[in-house]
Image (spheres, rainbow, N blue to C red):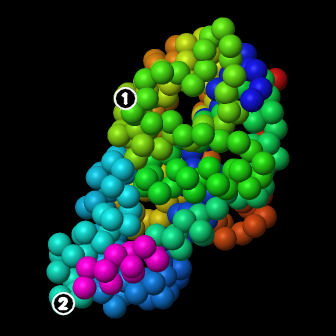
Amino acid sequence: MRRFTPEKLVIFDYSGTLSLDAPRFGRQENLVPALAETGLAALGVATPEAFWDQIVNPTWTEASTTDAGYKNVMAGRIAALGLAPGAPAGEIEAAASRFVDRYLVESSIDPHWRPVLSHLSARPDTIVIVATDHYAEATETIIRYLRSWSIPARKTGKGGTAPYFSVKNRELSPLFVANSADLGAWKADRRFWEIVKLQLSLEHLRRLLLIDDFGFNEEEGNSYSERAKVTVRQAKTTDLLREIFQTAVEVIPFCLARDLQYQEEARARLIAEAAARIARFLG
């Protein structure tokens, strides 16, 4: 553990920002083979329309704000809809588990972010939070990805009320993962940030930087990516951060056109641009 005197807070979104591969997994050319190869297609979830309209969108609230987990919610939904009459529960659960595991494996952090995150985690004046609206399984996945780069990380959660470090003895892990599934609220909700502020004792920040796609980079079939919702989400989240942390808030919208998301050069360029703005923020 190292001692910190945090003055700045840098917040990264995960899916669509740190991980551009996470939303790319939902594209038809990737999703359809995944549904077939994991066994979900044989259980009645064979098309993107069935996946988004019957499975993901109707269960998003429960799956992203509770500890139920993507695997359990997906298996329960398939069984409840009767998409695979006569299929044993174990077969449905196994297929859902294979699919979610594959999704998480293919949702890694883009390696171009590594030097940025490594530098930030070493700064004694800065706290870094990966804040995400996600499934319960994502928390440990993100922490493992970071630790594979020798970046220690810990989770936040709605169960705890004591801060992770005291004002007199500021010792903490350099990076935290705040997941809606652990906090019981989305990033656009006041409760999400109130819990984070309480647990990390963030009462005396001077500046705050948010890097987020606000759902812009998600697959079109995902209702989370609807443009009207993206705009509202950005405005509401920014206002909440300013109000709750009582400090100036700078925002880097991390948006990449869908036709460029497969292009390594475009991804690298967007991350480099964000990195330059982060460097200016750190000053």
Q: Which mark is residue 191?
A: 1
Disc 1 marks which amino acid?
Answer: Arg
74 sits to left or right of 83: right
3 sits to left or right of 138: right
Highlighted range, magenta: 88-99
Q: Earlier in the sequence, mark 1 or mark 2?
A: 2
Query: Compared with residue 40, is residue 282 higher up or lower down, i.e. above or below?
Result: above
Question: Is residue 179 visible to us here?
Answer: yes
Query: Compared with residue 39, is residue 104 higher up or lower down, i.e. above or below?
Result: above
Residue at (50%, 36%) from the top-left corner?
A: 156
Q: Which mark is residue 86?
A: 2
Q: Position of residue 251 (x, y in %)?
A: 60, 33
Residue at (34%, 46%) from the top-left corner?
A: 65
Residue at (82%, 38%) from the top-left corner?
A: 119
The quadrant holding residue 22 is bottom right
Cα distance in 3D space between marks 1 and 2: 42 Å
